[in-house]
Image: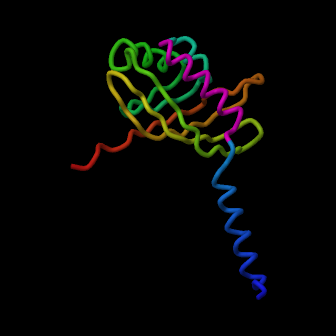
Amino acid sequence: MKTPKWIAALAIAGLSVVAVGAQKPDPDAQKLADQYIAAFAKGDTKALTALYTADATRLGPDGQLLTGRAAIEKGYVDGFAGPLKGSTLSLQQGRVQAVTPDVKIMEGRYTVAGVAPIKGRYVNTIVRRGGAWLLASVVTIPDPPPAK
């Protein structure tokens, strides 16, 4: 018995959708994420801040919007002196979309374990400046509390 051509075409189309959904990690985004995780693990606010553009914005899980490296650095200094003290960070890369050769949107999941454990999603805009990828915009959205 022969399989109709439309069934074979539908099966191939379905496999294509699965392949697109299972995107390989973006090496540029992964390198930036690895640098971020390493700096976070050390509580190195200078190294973290250096991963941002001069005019970057950061919307933290607490809803605070910070603009510019100085404000972002102060936010990290305050965080590591308080709720982030001794915390660890893990990032799970999701989809990365190239907007232009020098701009990408990356999304994924984060987990901060420690004094103030939080899990959630992130959506970052990264830009290539001088051959390096930097964070231009960071938005973190904490998961809602579990339903009771």
147 to 45, vertically: above or below: below
Q: Nearer the viewer, residue 134 or 26?
A: 26
Q: Residue at x 37, y 33 (%)?
A: 118
Q: Which residue range is magenta in the image? A: 25-43
User: Is residue 32 located in the magenta-colored stretch of the structure?
Assistant: yes
Residue 138 lies, in percent from the top left, at: 53, 33
State the residue lying farthest toward the front. 1
Q: How many marks?
A: 0
Image vertical order of residue 116 relative to residue 77, above or below: below
Q: Position of residue 81 (x, y in %)?
A: 36, 12
Please determine whether, in this image, residue 19 is positioned above or below residue 102.
Answer: below
> Residue 124 at what x, y percent from top left?
57, 37
66 to the left or right of 12: left
Front position in the image: 105 or 15: 15
- Tell me if 29 is positioned left or right of 101 in this view: left
Quarter holding residue 21: bottom right
Residue 45 covered by magenta stretch: no
Residue 98 lies in what quarter of the image? top right
Q: Position of residue 105 (x, y in %)?
A: 63, 41
Residue pictured at 37% horizontal, 15% vertical = 85
Of residues 32 and 15, the one nearer the viewer is 15
Of residue 129 and residue 116, the one placed in the foreground of this image is 116
Q: Is residue 92 left or right of residue 81?
A: right
Residue at (71, 69) in percent of width and height: 13
- Give the main secondary structure, helix, strand or loop, of the magenta stretch: helix
